[in-house]
Image (spheres, coloured by chain):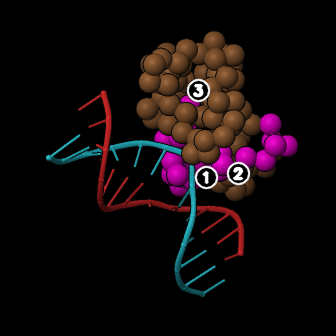
Chain colours: A brown, B cyan, C red
Amino acid sequence: MTASTTYEKIYSQVNKIPYGKVMTYGQIASVIDRCTARMVGYAMARVPIEKKVPWHRVINSKGEVSIRAHGDICMEQRLLLENEGMIFNDSGRVDLACYRWVDY
DNA sequence: CGGCTGACTCTGG
DNA sequence: TCCAGAGCCAGCC
C-alpha cells in the first residue's frame, strides 16, 4: 500500500486500530506528519468503501461520535462500537481512558 | 491559479 | 461542566 497522499496515510493509520479500541482525530493527526485534526475528519467523511477502513473507531477528543449527518450513520457507528464491547454513557460518550489506543 | 469546505482541537470565561 | 471563538491545511471545484 503506497501511502503517498495524506489521505492514504490517514486510512492506513485508521486500519491499524485494533478491535475494541478507538483513536481520536487529533491522535491520528499527531502520528501523521503535516496533518491536522480537520484533515482526518475530512478524510473520514470521504472514506472510500473499498478501503474497508474502520472509520467507526475514529471519534473526537471528547470521546463522542462526531458525525455531523443526523442520519442512520451516527447510530450505525454507535452500534458498531457497542458491538465491539464499548459502553456509551448518558452523555453519549465512551471512556477514552479505557478505549483510546496509542500507536507506537 | 484562487477560493471554499470540513466527521476537529485548544483556550478562556 | 458547558459555550463561543480562532487556528489549521489538503483536496476539490
Quarter of the image with the N terminus of chain A in it: top right
| Corner quadrant of residue A78 | top right
The residue tagged 2 is: A46
Q: Chain of mark 3?
A: A
* Range of magenta residues: A23-52
Q: Chain of mark 2?
A: A
SS type, badge 2 = loop
Q: Position of residue A17 (x, y in %)?
A: 65, 28
The residue tagged 1 is: A42
- A4 inside magenta stretch: no
Instruction: Give whichever of A29, B8 is nearer the camera.
Output: B8
Contact check, label 1 and label 2, Cβ < 8 Å: yes
Residue at image point 63% right, 35% down:
A74
Residue at image point 50% right, 31% down:
A64
Quote the CA–CA distance across marks 3 and 1: 18 Å
Q: Chain of mark 1?
A: A
Quarter of the image with the C terminus of chain A in it: top right
Quote the CA–CA distance across marks 1 and 2: 7 Å
Q: What kind of residue is marked 1?
A: Tyr
The tag earlier along the polypeptide, 2 or 3, is 3
Q: What kind of residue is marked 2?
A: Arg
Do badges 1 and 2 share one subunit? Answer: yes
Contact check, label 3 and label 1, Cβ < 8 Å: no
Q: Position of residue A49 (x, y in %)?
A: 81, 43
Q: Residues within 10 Å of mark 1 (few under 14, many from 20)?
A: few
Residue at image point 70% right, 56% down:
A5
Do badges 3 and 1 share one subunit? Answer: yes
Quote the CA–CA distance across marks 2 and 3: 19 Å
